[in-house]
Amino acid sequence: MNVTVIGAGTMGNGIAHTFAQKGNNVFLYDTNETQLALAIKTIGINLDRQVKGGKISEHTKNETLKNIQCTSSLAQASEGATLVVEAIVENLEIKKSLFMQLNNLVREDTILASNTSSISISTLALASSRPDCVIGMHFFNPVPIMTLVEIIIGKRTSEQTLSRVKSIVVELDKTPILVNDFPGFISNRVLMPMINEAILALEEGVAEVEAIDQIMKLGMAHPMGPLQLADFIGLDVCLNIMNVLHDGFKSDKYLPAGLLVKMVELGQLGKKSGKGFYSYN
């Protein structure tokens, strides 16, 4: 299968890695060639980790890297694609602009999937000339390890598109879970308010950062506390999703915590910026 992955960031390189490891031909596209080089380097490091752990062979690693081509040309990346997976910035207008460009670049039967974690698939589909072929494929980080793919069914997603995407996910040795198109879907509709509540508790002085995280880890069997998880997701991403929930449901129940807004304004975005609720070297 010919797969185009748009966006070479953390999610994009993980998605490209996963498809390529299963023998698919992958075009990894990004406008930033430095980011493309970093993505290939990251994929190589992650493959080495898999080899060291005995999960794959050296041959599989080499074949996986051979299956990935990088390009900064959207036309080249899209030509002949069976499936396009968009993994760019979580911004509706930017995503819509991309989907409009893809209208003229891909075949009529090409499936257009978005890795969005909160934006409406039905709204994105309005920017496409083939809304029946638009669907959500929400992978989880780190993509090569996490087995869940949240499949979001838009209002005009066809049964044929849904059936094909479910099969593709199974072929990746992952588990497809179907949800309908509501703000935040299921994963972030449940997760983000919990993270936001943890930030509110910190802001109100109920407990310190480490205490909040330890309580959720030891008492609720969470592998990672909500504030540490927010750092790994990116506080800007958390804020964007809370804003999507707040706008979508028109309820102050989803109003972002003031501390979250302030930290994003200060550039304290979590692990990727070196500082969030924790400090990272």
Image (cartoon, rainbow, N blue to C red):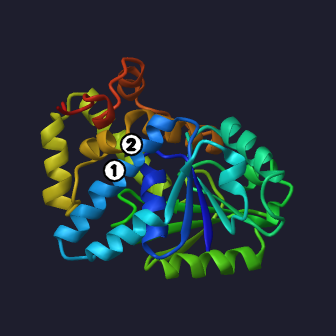
Find residue 54 and name its label.
Answer: none
Which residue is the extreme one toward the top? 266
The residue beneath circle 2 is 38
Residue type at mark 2 is Leu
The x and y percentages for residue 209 are 18, 36
Question: Contact (CB < 8 A) between labels 1 and 2?
Answer: yes
The quarter of the picture where the N terminus appears is bottom right
Secondary structure at numbered mark 1: helix
Q: Secondary structure at mark 2?
A: helix
Q: Which residue is mark 1?
A: 42
* In-front residue for pair 206/247: 247
Tell me what residue is drawn at x 56 percent, y 68 percent.
25
Quadrant location of residue 202? top left
Residue type, numbered disc 1 = Thr
250 sits left or right of 189 in the view: right
User: Which quadrant is home to the C terminus?
Assistant: top left
Count neighbours of disc 2 (C-alpha within 10 A) and say few if under 14, some if 14 to 19, many if 20 or more: some
